Amino acid sequence: MPKLLQINVCCNVYSTGKICEQIGLSAKKVGWDSYIAYARGFKPSQSTTIKVGRKLDVYLHYALQRIFDIEGLASRRATKKLVKEIDTIKPDIVQLHNIHDHYLNYKILFEYLNSSDIKVVWTFHDCWAFTGHCFHFVTKQCDRWRTGCYDCPLKDEYPETFLDRSVENYALKRHLFSGSPNLTIVPCSDWMDAFVKQSFLKEKKTFVIKNGVDLQTFKPVTTQEFQLTKEDYNIIAVSTVWNKEKGYDDVLKLRSILPPNYIITLVGLTQEQKDSLPDGIIGIQRTQNVHELVELYSNADVLINPTYADTFPTVNLEALACGTPVITYNTGGSPESIDEFTGIVVQQGNVNDLAMAIQRLHTCPLSRRDCRSRAETLFDKEKCFDKYIELYNRILSE
C-alpha cells in the first residue's frame, strides 16, 4: 500500500489546509495511506496527522525572522523530529505545500530529502521558493529573482525583517531546490508555471494542477438572512485577511464612487477594521462557518477580488460554484478562473474601471447558471485533486 505524506503549515483549514485534506481523501479513496504534517491551524482530518513543533518554536522562529531574515531556517529541533517521523513512515511521496511561515527548517528537510530516494512533489501556492525573501514580487514589479536577489525592496513587508539576507537566501534555495534530484513542481496556475520556467527551477518538471472546490458544499442556496432589498445591488468581497495587498484600500475607495444602493459586504475583517467601516459597507469577521459563507456567496450579485498578489484564489471558485459572477483584477492567476460569460477582468488598481464593471453587470447580468456550469466543468474538487494521484502514480512508475 503506497504512502503519502503532506507537509503544510495548517491542516483542513484555510485554502492550503483544505487542499491538503482533499488530496488526502483522493489518496485514501484509491488505497493509499495518507499523513499530514502541520504546525498550526487545525480541524480534524481523515488523514493521520503529525504536529510539527510547539507554539514556542513558532514564536521564536518569527522573532528570529523579524531580525535576521531567516524565514524557514530556524525550528531546527522541530524539523529534526519531523525528519525522524518521515524516516519511520517511509512515504513513497512527500507532498510539500507552504513550508514557510515560521515552523520548519527547509535546509534540514531538503538535505534529508535530497539524500533519500523519496519522490517529492511541491505545490507552489506563491513565489517564495524561488526568491530571496518575498512571497509575491509582483507587488513591487521586482525581477531580481530571475538572476539573483539583493537589496530586497520587500523586506519591510510580510515577512518583515530588519536585516536583508536575500542574497544568501536566494543562493541557498537555488542550491537545495534546484539540486533536488526527485523534485516535481506543481504550479496551481498557468501564471505561476510561466514564472517557474523563468526561475532557477526552470529545469525541473512541472505539472499544472488548478485548485478545486467542493461542489456539494458550495452551491446556490436560498436564504433570507443575508438578502437586501430589491433596490440594492449586493457586492461581496472575501479574504482570510484584509490589507493593502488584498485590495482593502481599493474597496474603501470603491465605496466612495458607487451609488448608495450598491452595498458592499466585506468578509474576513478584524474587529478593529469592522468598527471603522464607512456607511455602505457591511463588515463580517473571518468565519470558518462554511454554510454561512455559501449563503453570503449565493445572495451576492457579484464577487469582487481586487487583489494585488494571488496565485489562483479559491474565493473566485467558491463564488462561481454558488452561481455568482466574479470581477477580478488582472493579478496573477486570478483571471484564469473566469471567462467572458462568468466575469470581468479589470486593470489592477483601476478602481474606476472596477466600479464601471460592477455597474455593467448590474445593467447586463451574467448567467448564474453559466457560473455554476464553469465550476462544475473545470473546478470540481474530485476531478482536480484526483490529478495529484495520477501524477503520483506516473512518478512512481518512471
Image: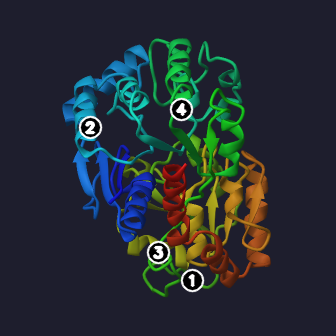
Density class for disc 1 (Cα within 10 Å; few <14, some 14-19, many ≥20) is: few
Residue at (51, 23) in percent of width and height: 173
- Residue denoted by label 1: 229
Residue at (59, 35) in percent of width and height: 136
Q: Amino acid at mark 1?
A: Thr
Between 144 and 89, the one nearer to me in the picture:
89
Please tell me which of labels 4 and 1 falls first in the chain: 4
Tell whether label 2 touches label 3 (CB within 8 Å). no
User: Percent from the top left, x then y, of residue 208?
Assistant: 63, 52
Spatial CA span between label 4 and label 3: 33 Å
Q: Amino acid at mark 3?
A: Val
- Where residue 87 is drawn, which disc sits there? 2
Q: Amino acid at mark 4?
A: Ala
User: Percent from the top left, x then y, of residue 175?
Assistant: 53, 20
As drawn, 223 above or below 144: below
- Residue denoted by label 3: 294
Please tell me which of labels 1 and 3 falls first in the chain: 1
As drawn, 280 above or below 125: below
Spatial CA span between label 4 and label 1: 47 Å
User: Percent from the top left, x then y, of residue 50?
Assistant: 23, 47
| Labels 4, 3: front one | 4
Where the N terminus falls, by quadrant? bottom left
